[in-house]
Amino acid sequence: MYKVRTYNKISVKGLDRFPRQSFEVGGDIAHPDAFLIRSQKLQGIEVPASLLAVARAGAGVNNVPVAEYGKQGIVVFNTPGANANAVKELVMAGMLLSARGIVEGMAFVQSLRDINDSAEMSPILEKEKSRFAGTEIRGKTLGIIGLGAIGSMVADMALAMGLQVIGFDPALSIDAAWRLSNSVGRMENLQALLARSDYVSLHVPATDATRHMINASTLAAIKPGAVLLNFARDAIVDSSAVLASLAEGKLGRYVCDFPEPSLLGHPKIIAMPHIGASTEESEENCAVMAANQLVDYLQNGNIVNSVNFPAISMDRSPGTSRITFSNANVSGVLGNVLSVLATHKVNVADMLNKSRGELAFNLIDVESVPDETVIKAIEAVEHVIRVRVI
């Protein structure tokens, strides 16, 4: 029986993905094989010796000590793309709110609550509505920084709305490139994109490389009057630089999903309460994807959408047992493990080895169930981190 400890509220549709005959799931599980979390911060939480995997129902994993877990052989999963549509739609809402005087106009309407006569209100509305006219987004240029799952969907949506779209992503993967419309213009650097864009939408993860990538220096290159939209991560934008650019009249508006005290009450800032992925559908999608990944890993050793181990998947060979092991990505480890199996006359039916950065992962199907002596011998191989038999 596999045990999964949940943190936060997880969608029932996700919890239903765990087969009840082989999984025990709950918030007070002792000796869990896996954690299933949303926003729970795991830094500082004691790591059970039994823990094999963590699945984050969402894309960001800044609440998980990923590198530390990797050194212990704990696979960390996320759910890229599961909340992409929710974020995409909110980006469009942000663009429209910034283009038209919708927020200000609604506030003005609410200020007329003392008027009880519609005939009296109508001429006031007609007189004042020009203050909230705004502009249309059709024909404008949207610059997208980060062209992954969300960025590519935002690009398609913007093209359908009649915008011109340009993008910048120095880490664009082959899969992401295939998803991207050929109508999206590729920019060679961030400054060139900022200089051409009427709207700039951020869709990169929060890493050391992207921290404050929007700062005083980069904002100096932005097209005067441009709107900056941040539905990615707060750390990507230096808010003090944004405030300075707004004060100088360089940046037109800032729309974000990450309020902080210094941004509140500013007439050129629209701040939302971190609701980018907060839709019923998004939470269900994230929970289902996270649960499916945990089930496949615990039952088969397959890894899909891990942020610290390589993607690896192999069909089970009929009538075999499966050995999985993680190791430091140095030469000779797999060979030494195979020598152990040969010494103990354990025949290999199929195998697969993958590496990612400093870590590697292995799937080995063997024709007989390895006993404890074999497992102990594999664990003793230098640089092997964790061994499991399925």
Image: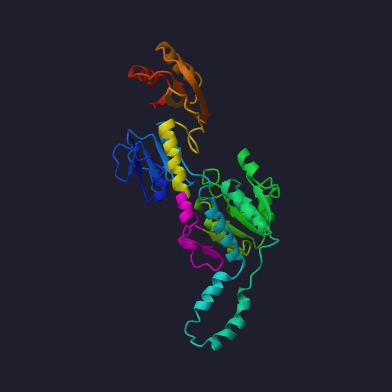
* On screen, residue 27 above or below 371: below
Residue 57, can we see it? Answer: no
Where, quadrant-wise, is the N terminus in this rendering? top left
Residue 135, can we see it? Answer: yes
Where, quadrant-wise, is the C terminus in this rendering? top left
Q: Main secondary structure of the magenta part?
A: loop
Q: Position of residue 48 (x, y in %)?
A: 32, 36
Q: Which residues are magenta?
A: 257-284
* On screen, residue 285 above or below 331: below
Q: Position of residue 334 (x, y in %)?
A: 48, 20
- Name the side, left or right, on which 20 lies relative to 142: left
Q: Position of residue 77 (x, y in %)?
A: 46, 40
Q: Position of residue 81 (x, y in %)?
A: 53, 47
Display coloring: rainbow
Q: Residue placed at 44% from the left, 31% from the top?
A: 301
Query: Is residue 321 or residue 157 the one in the foreground?
Result: 321
Residue 379 belongs to the span the image colors magenta: no
Query: Is residue 7 or residue 381 the one in the foreground?
Result: 7
- Name the side, left or right, on which 31 lies relative to 274: left
Q: Quadrant of residue 88?
A: bottom right
Query: Is residue 101 or residue 346 the one in the foreground?
Result: 346
* On screen, residue 127 above or below 186: below
Q: Quadrant of residue 26?
A: top left
- Name the side, left or right, on which 10 lies relative to 105: left
Residue 272 belongs to the span the image colors magenta: yes
Q: Quadrant of residue 375?
A: top left
Q: Residue placed at 42% from the left, 24% from the top?
A: 322
Q: Residue placed at 63% from the left, 58% from the top?
A: 199
- How many numbered badges does the structure rendering display? 0
